[in-house]
């Protein structure tokens, strides 16, 4: 089980390597949400997303022998870039399994860090491909969320936010596999026990909402949503025992609400945010958090979206 102490240890390990991302304010968002919103902008993180935190924390702990054998990861984009960049900084060969239909900007960015990218087609299992590569190369698999050091690393974003902003009443974060919300909840419950923690997922990818209702992990089909970073089909084996237990509530937002949040962030805050990163803002913007007049910390998970897709989504 991952603990708050693991998150604090991860913060020391990534200090000076990962960016301490800014906390931004928007009077327009405050007015629209009827709350005081603090945006933790992980779209300004190295690699364009919070994923670099967990990737670097995990890779930096490998033994010299493990580093020499290399790592394998599978991801549609942000974890791929995080692992590729962390591996480059640490002198480790990284092989990343990515879908052929992944965003071109994410594929190009992953390759730009020196990683070997192996693509797969619709219907193929990225996990099976990664396991085959692990066996062939005797490499270490770094999964996108189901890994204790990855979870601890992701929690450092919330740790920075809560250390910077006092008296947070609520912490809101997007939910895919659960690494970010698990690490964030561990931090919130340690530093602000009274604060409510809310996880946000797209309506079409509501595996966490269904799992909470069922009291156990539930699997869904391939989700159809613009938030590709949140298109998981079930909670993780490690993240469910954490987030499923201590996150106060899971809520959903529609793709149209995500688009509206992206548009507001671009027009009024002057930042570019990918759909998955805007899901948490959409929850605050459209009253899904269920609070008024509160101080709400919102984690924007990333900003990796190509310009044509971004333009189409906010138009």
Image (cartoon, rainbow, N blue to C red):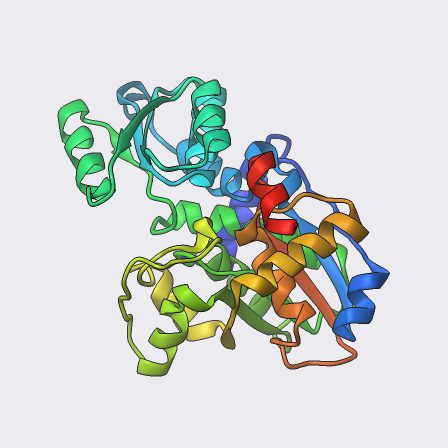
**Residue at 60% of width from left, 35% of height from top?**
307
Q: Quadrant of residue 18?
A: top right
Q: Residue at x 51, y 77 (%)?
A: 248
Q: Residue 116 at what x, y percent from top left?
A: 34, 21
Relative to 26, residue 212 above or below: below
> Where residue 285 sits in the image (x, y, percent)?
69, 68
**Residue 91 placement, left or right of 259:** left
Q: Is residue 281 left or right of residue 224?
A: right
Q: Nearer the viewer, residue 168 or 273?
A: 273
Q: Nearer the viewer, residue 39 or 285?
A: 285
Give the number of marks.
0
> Measured along the vertical axis of the image, is residue 111 above or below residue 80?
above
Q: Where is residue 46 drawn, in percent x and y?
A: 59, 33
Residue under the point 64% across and 81% down:
290
> Where's residue 243, x and y in %?
43, 67
Residue 293, compared with residue 228, is above or below; it is: below
**Residue 271 at least partly seen:** yes
Q: Is residue 187 visible?
A: no
Q: Nearer the viewer, residue 13 or 283?
A: 283
Which quarter of the image is occupied by the N terminus? bottom left
- Residue at coordinates 38% horizontally, 20% vertically from top-left? 92
The furthest residue to the right: 27
């Amino acid at each position: 089980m991952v603990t708050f102490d693991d998150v604090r240890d991860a913060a020391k390990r990534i200090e000076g390597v990962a960016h301490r991302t800014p906390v931004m304010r928007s009077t327009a968002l405050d007015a629209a949400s009827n709350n005081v919103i603090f945006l933790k902008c992980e779209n300004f993180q190295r690699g364009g997303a919070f994923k670099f935190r967990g990737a670097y924390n995990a890779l930096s702990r490998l033994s010299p022998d493990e580093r020499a054998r290399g790592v394998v990861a599978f991801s549609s984009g942000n974890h791929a870039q995080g692992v590729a960049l962390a591996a480059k900084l640490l002198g480790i060969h990284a092989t990343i399994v990515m879908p052929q239909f992944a965003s071109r900007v994410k594929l190009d960015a992953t390759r730009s860090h020196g990683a070997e990218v192996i693509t797969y087609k619709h219907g193929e299992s990225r996990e099976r491909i990664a396991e085959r590569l692990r066996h062939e190369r005797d490499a270490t698999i770094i999964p996108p969320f189901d890994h204790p050091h990855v979870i601890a690393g992701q929690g450092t974003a919330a740790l920075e936010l809560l250390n910077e902003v006092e008296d947070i009443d609520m912490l809101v974060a997007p939910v895919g596999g659960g690494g970010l919300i698990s690490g964030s909840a561990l931090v919130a419950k340690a530093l602000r026990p009274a604060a409510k923690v809310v996880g946000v997922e797209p309506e079409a990818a509501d595996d966490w909402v269904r799992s909470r209702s069922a009291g156990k992990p539930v699997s869904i089909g391939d989700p159809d949503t613009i938030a590709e970073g949140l298109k998981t089909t079930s909670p993780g084996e490690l993240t469910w025992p954490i987030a499923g237990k201590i996150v106060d509530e899971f809520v959903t937002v529609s793709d149209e609400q995500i688009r509206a949040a992206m548009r507001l962030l671009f027009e009024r805050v002057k930042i570019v945010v990918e759909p998955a990163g805007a899901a948490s803002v959409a929850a605050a913007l459209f009253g899904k958090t269920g609070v008024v007049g509160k101080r709400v910390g919102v984690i924007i998970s990333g900003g990796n979206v190509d310009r044509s897709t971004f333009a189409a989504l906010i138009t």
